Amino acid sequence: MQESIKQYKRIRDKVDTLSGKLEAEHQKHLSCKMGCDLCCMDYSILPLEYYSIRDALKARNLVPELPSVNKPGSCVFLKDHKCTIYDERPVICRTHGLPLLFMGEDDNWELSACELNFNNFDFADFTNENTFPQDRINSELFMANETFVQEFDEKKYDEFDLIPIRILAEEIKTK
């Protein structure tokens, strides 16, 4: 199980490195900044991410300050337009605002890009080199999670299970 957590952290580091490269490359188009939280939603994450984040917060003895009221559908860790678990945020949160390339339901490559960022951009200019390879990262994450759930004794999960991140906030509040 510890090896799965280490693998997750390596994936997360890879995401951060690639995101940093893409942020620098697309800097003139990115308008993401403190206070822009339209992407901060009540996501569900894999058990591997959930327990890695939970354990990291516990290890740092960090109990994030949560808002007393939250907009429906927004992330419970969003307070005053800032992420209270920023250093430990899930992989999906680390890619927000960037152009994401993924395989669509009809087996065609699709591109997702924040319309607030890329509003004066020719989408034909996106390539494999200047977009985030969402499927490749998700595959790595899924495989690490698959190993994690097989070795995890605290609770039984299926490899396809997702845990709403708001559950983490509830768990932290009760500790």
Image (cartoon, rainbow, N blue to C red):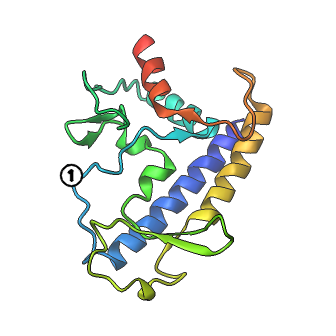
Residue 123 horizontal/vertical position (percent): 41, 83
Give the percent coordinates (x, y) of residue 141.
65, 52
Residue positioned most to the front: 106
| Residue type, mark 1 in image | Met
For disc 1, the marked residue is 34
Would residue 115 be found to the left or right of residue 89 on screen? Answer: left
Q: Quadrant of the C terminus?
A: top left
Residue 137 quadrant: bottom right
Residue 175 visible: no
Give percent across and percent down for residue 168.
48, 26
Answer with left or right where residue 140 lies relative to residue 56.
right
Q: Is residue 135 above or below residue 84?
A: below
Question: Among all residues in the image, which is located at the extreme right?
Answer: 150
Residue lying at the far top of the rendered structure: 174
The residue positioned 46% from the left and 60% from the top of the image is: 16
Q: Nearer the viewer, residue 38 or 51?
A: 38
In what quadrant of the picture does the N terminus appear?
Answer: top right
Residue at 40% x, 68% y: name it: 113
Asked if residue 87 is positioned above or below residue 59 in the image, the reply reads below
Q: Quadrant of residue 52?
A: top right
**Front one among 70 and 172:** 70
Q: Give me the residue at 33% from left, 27% from top.
A: 64
